[in-house]
């Protein structure tokens, strides 16, 4: 299956289901490995909310972009961006920054 088709299916079928679960009292079904990340897209107004995999390390949330070459959302976090997280049923706000060129930071995040 081509990557673009796989990403469209994910965005239209899986992500809405995951968003609904993570916003509901049933969030515990997915909260151990997924959180909702809300950010302002570069183009247009409003806010975009996506489910993403995460790990927690020393109070920081490390968010993973699977297949980053095929996705664009994480690029919005370059240089730092205000974000809102819904994690384990609670809302948090913070500053996120994309890490792409620090192999040690990436390895530490993956081993968290």
Image: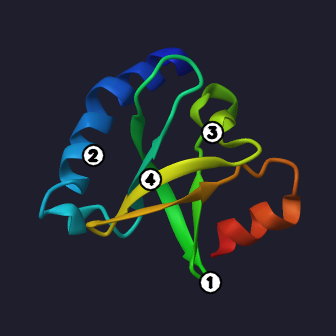
Q: What separation in Å lies between label 2 and label 3 (alpha carbons)?
A: 19 Å
Identify the element where label 3 is drawn: helix
The image quadrant that residue 111 belongs to is: bottom right
Residue sitting farthest toward the left: 25
Q: Which residue is mark 2?
A: 18
Q: Earlier in the sequence, mark 4 or mark 2?
A: 2
Work out whether mark 3 precedes mark 4 in sequence or the reverse, and give the earlier one. Answer: 3
Residue 10 lies, in percent from the top left, at 38, 30
Cα–Cα span, label 3 and label 1: 22 Å
Task: Give the quadrant of residue 102.
Answer: bottom right
Instruction: Tell whether label 2 touches label 1 (CB within 8 Å).
Output: no
According to the picture, the residue beneath numbered tag 3 turns out to be: 74
State yes or no: discs 1 and 4 in contact (Cβ < 8 Å).
no
Quick one: label 1 or label 4, which is nearer the N terminus?
A: 1
| Label 4 element class | strand
Reading the chain from its start, which is encountered first: label 2 or label 3?
2
Image point (63%, 76%), residue name: 112
Query: Which tag, 1 or 2, sits closer to the chain's start?
Result: 2
Judged from the image, the secondary structure of the residue bearing numbered disc 1 is loop
Q: Which residue is mark 1?
A: 58
Q: CA distance from mark 1 to mark 4?
A: 19 Å
In the picture of the structure, the residue carrying the numbered disc 4 is: 84
Give the vertical position of 51 relative to 57 (above or below).
Answer: above
In the rendered view, does 19 fall on the left or right side of 107? left
């Amino acid at each position: 299956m081509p990557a673009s088709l796989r990403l469209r299916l994910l965005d239209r079928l899986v992500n809405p289901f995951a968003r609904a679960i993570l916003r509901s009292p049933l969030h515990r079904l997915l909260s151990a490995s997924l959180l909702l990340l809300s950010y302002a897209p570069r183009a247009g107004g409003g806010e975009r909310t996506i489910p993403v995999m995460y790990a927690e390390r020393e109070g920081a949330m490390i968010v993973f972009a699977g297949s980053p070459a095929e996705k664009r959302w994480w690029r919005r976090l370059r240089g730092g961006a205000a974000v809102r997280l819904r994690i384990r049923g609670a809302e948090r706000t913070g500053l996120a920054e994309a890490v792409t060129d620090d192999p040690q930071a990436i390895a530490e995040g993956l081993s968290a």
